[in-house]
Image: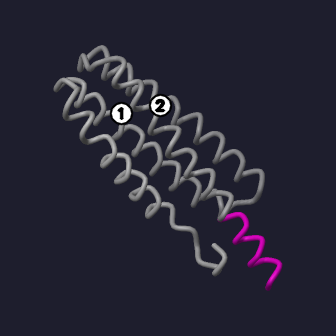
Amino acid sequence: MANGKNPNFIKHLITASAISIVIATYPVYAYASQIQVYSIICGYIIGLINAVAGYRLNELAFKKPVKSFMVIVFGGMGIRMLFIAISILILLYIAKLDEVSLVASVFFFYILFVTLEIIYLHKKQLLIKKTVSGA
């Protein structure tokens, strides 16, 4: 960020995903059942969809005035949380995935990706302030 480059959320998302997968590969392979592996993968996919949707909404929000920005960011967060809840319910009651593995992986990836999203928003806001004050 110090060099004035635009923060790259997708690059950080891929990096965090790769690190998580590398760290989790052996324990999941050694100790998890097949249904638990499917549950963990589904939790990751839900978290990834949520993160990419958040990124797209944030990009849209930065082009709007402050009031619209807040509505898009917080409203989008609420809609995305609703998507997560509905997805979990569908996967638990229809697909019959493992409850603990699914919820734990959704929770882990949600926290990880939301942390990256907050960092991205902060860096993007600093970049915008720097650009406006420097112009």
Whether residue 133 is in magenta: the answer is: yes
Please name the residue shown 66% across and 61% down the image: 62
The residue most toward the top is 93
Question: In this picture, which residue range is highlighted in magenta?
Answer: 124-135
Left or right: residue 34 versus residue 40 is left
Residue type beneath disc 2: Phe
Residue 63 x/y as whole percent: 65, 64
Compared to residue 82, the image places residue 112 above or below, namely below
Q: Quadrant of residue 99?
A: top left
Residue at 63 percent of width and 50 percent of height: 118
Which residue is the site of mark 2? Answer: 107
From the top left corner, tell me how far across and down residue 115 is, in percent. Answer: 58, 46
Q: For the residue labelled by badge 1, is the local secondary structure a helix, a strand or a loop?
A: helix
The quarter of the picture where residue 119 lies is bottom right
Q: Quadrant of the N terminus?
A: bottom right
Circle 1: is it few (<14), some (14-19), or many (20+) Cα within 10 Å? many
- Residue 50 colored in magenta in the image: no
On screen, residue 71 versus residue 92, left or right, reads right
Which corner quadrant holds the C terminus?
Answer: bottom right
Whether residues under marks 1 and 2 lie with C-beta atoms below 8 angstroms apart, the answer is yes
Image point (22%, 26%), residue name: 32
Q: Residues within 10 Å of mark 2 (few under 14, many from 20)?
A: some
Amino acid of disc 1: Gly
Q: On the image, numbered disc 1 is attached to which residue?
A: 43
Q: Is residue 85 left or right of residue 121?
A: left
Q: Nearer the viewer, residue 87 or 15?
A: 15
User: In front: 9, or 101?
Assistant: 101
Outermost residue, left side: 34
Residue in the foreground of this view, choosing between 76 and 48: 48
From the top left corner, tell me how far across and down residue 66 is, in percent: 77, 56
Q: 81 above or below 1?
A: above
